[in-house]
Image (cartoon, rainbow, N blue to C red):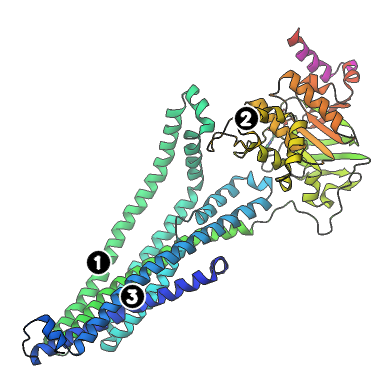
Amino acid sequence: MFGQLWACSPSLTLASAVLRLVQAVQPAVALYVAKLIVDEVIHLSHVAGPSASVMEWVTQGGAGRLQGLLGAEFGLIILFDLTSRGVALVDGLLNERYVNAVSLALMEHAATLDLQQFESSALQDLLERARRQASGRNNLLVQLFNIAQTAVTALMLAIGVTVFAPWMVLLLVVALLPSAAGEAHFNARAYRLARTKTAERREMEYLRYVGASAEHAKELKLFGLGDFLVGRFRSAAATVLDQNRKLATRRFVWSSVFAAIGSAAYYGVYVVIVWDTVHGRLSVGDLTFLSGSFLRLHGLLSSLLLGITQTAAQAQYLDDFYAFLDLRPVIRSPALARPFPSPIREGIRFQGVGFRYPGTDIWAVRHLDLTIHAGETIALVGENGAGKTTIVKLLTRLYEPDEGEITVDGVSLRDMDLHDLRAHIGVIFQDFVRYSLTASENIAVGRISALADTARIKAAAREGLADGVVGKLPMGYEQPLGKRVAKGRDLSGGEWQKIAISRAYMRDADLLILDEPTSALDARAEADVFERMRALRHGKAALVISHRFSTVRTADRIVVLEHGKVLETGTHEQLLAMHGRYAELFALQAEGYQ
Ligand SMILES: Nc1ncnc2c1ncn2[C@@H]1O[C@H](COP(=O)(O)OP(=O)(O)OP(=O)(O)O)[C@@H](O)[C@H]1O
């Protein structure tokens, strides 16, 4: 963490350390000056004659050494004020930089992980706890600096007190040990509790998001889900709250007892100091210094021990953060990658491919043999859950097959660089993302390196039919889309799909995959999309998933999937002639139109 901090800003880190050191030394010096003042006052009250006024007393040098001491004390007060403001300023700036650096590390690392890792709830829990580190709420940084500063101040005071009575310091430390042990115990329990409740906290986070977001408002209102969500949140919050309350109450009771032990020790020592002063073994100045130092030392040691145990508790979240950064993706590029065979000459082959989603024992696809020839348009059809989208995920290596192999012109996907592979495939999923960005950026995400290439974006928009959509927006390509942003315009489902389809045209993909992206398009627009796709493909392969037979029948070859296996394959006419599953499904849909 300190490494990260130093990297954020060496100058600010150094400035904070120096300012805090000055601050740390100040209390001991101030107390010592106060002692000197008291002793001097008592001395002067015995020897000095009366002066007519303060001015006369000061100007005629009656105050003597006391003047210098008062000046020094005043200077210390100003210095203390300045350094505390300086520390607040520097720490504020440094903390913001650190929190940003942590957020960036989190995002950068998240981008390297597998989809499969994201879909596991264990990772979501870890991520949730790691995010706490990035939220800046816990302010671990300031806590750590405070500890260091308090430790220096306590050390200075302890040295001062030791000169008079070493056993006093020892007694104070011993008296505070139960308190420290208690804090450590309760912090560990609080972390364990938070850890076991991460899933509940995530659920609460989700409910809060669903219950108060523009995306969900429509359905929430129409289904009247407000009370249901509020009730769900309440009961989730109640269990978390109840356990936290129990722990907090026990903590309160025990900490009070331990703190009382510490205070008793302090007062015991105080009585001894007073007794020594009354009997002339200590001066009144010594009494001021010792009682002041002792009070401060007591406070400082308590907050030091508290700070250390609290920081140790926070550091457990830091552990989670670094555990997250230590996660390595399972799907990786090989050290010596082979290039994606572009243009594809033979085709893409699935040979005996089998795959189960992690944590399930059902094969989503199994014994799958399929070839997509160069320049061919294949339509994948099949009932819900037949495995169509899974094939696309395997083809783009979002998941790795458990059995068999996928090759492009004989080169296994495993032997290619991941970025190279994905750069040659243009995919639009059915659940494409509606980014709260401008129209132009929403299209450019298909090839983010071309963000500034307006001509390319406009051409892609024409090819994906988004130009008509953008033409109607008041701010054109610069129009922010979605409900979240200022001046944002939302689009209809079909209009969003046109934007998404245009993304695919931002790439020079050797394989274009459209996973039901035309489901919301009207009949004319859909026909248009496929006509353009054929015209613009220039002999490149395409894979289209659709439940609409008007689209499916135009493909060069149709593959019917059932339970993750190829059931039938052929052209529309061939499949109809077979009177198999395709013919049955086609007849069902055709019936609806008669
Ligand atoms: N992330 C996942 N984890 C576990 N099982 C999954 C996951 N995604 C899909 N499945 C399961 O894998 C099977 C194949 O799903 P897939 O999404 O490939 O179907 P599909 O043919 O695209 O269906 P649809 O026509 O409904 O889009 C289904 O039984 C589904 O329940």
Circle 3 packing at 10 Å, graded few (<14), some (14-19), many (20+), is some
Residue at image mark 3: 79
Residue at image mark 2: 473
Which image quarter: residue 53?
bottom left
State how far apart marks 3 and 1 are (Cα).
34 Å
Residue 260 numbered mark, or none: 1
Q: Is residue 364 visible?
A: no
Residue at figure coordinates x 32%, y 81% from the top left: 158
- Kind of residue sitting beneath label 2: Leu
| Quadrant in which the N terminus is drawn | bottom right
State how far apart marks 3 and 2 are (Cα).
60 Å
Left or right of 173, for residue 446: right
Residue at figure coordinates x 76%, y 31% from the top left: 462
Q: Where does the image place residue 200, in percent across and percent down from the top left?
A: 48, 43
Upstream in the sequence, badge 3 or badge 1? Answer: 3
Left or right of 146, for residue 523: right
Which region shows up in magenta? 577-590
Q: Where does the image place residue 163, in percent across and percent down from the top left?
A: 29, 88
Q: Secondary structure at mark 3?
A: helix
- Kind of residue sitting beneath label 1: Ala
Left or right of 401, for residue 574: right
Q: Secondary structure at mark 2?
A: loop
User: Where is ligand 1, by quadrant?
Assistant: top right
State how far apart marks 1 and 2 are (Cα).
69 Å
Upstream in the sequence, badge 3 or badge 2? Answer: 3
Q: Is residue 215 above or below residue 331?
A: above
Q: Where does the image place residue 445, in percent across and percent down from the top left?
A: 69, 42
Residue at figure coordinates x 71%, y 30% from the top left: 467
Is the distance from the Cβ of mark 3 to the nearest ligand 1 atom less than 8 Å?
A: no
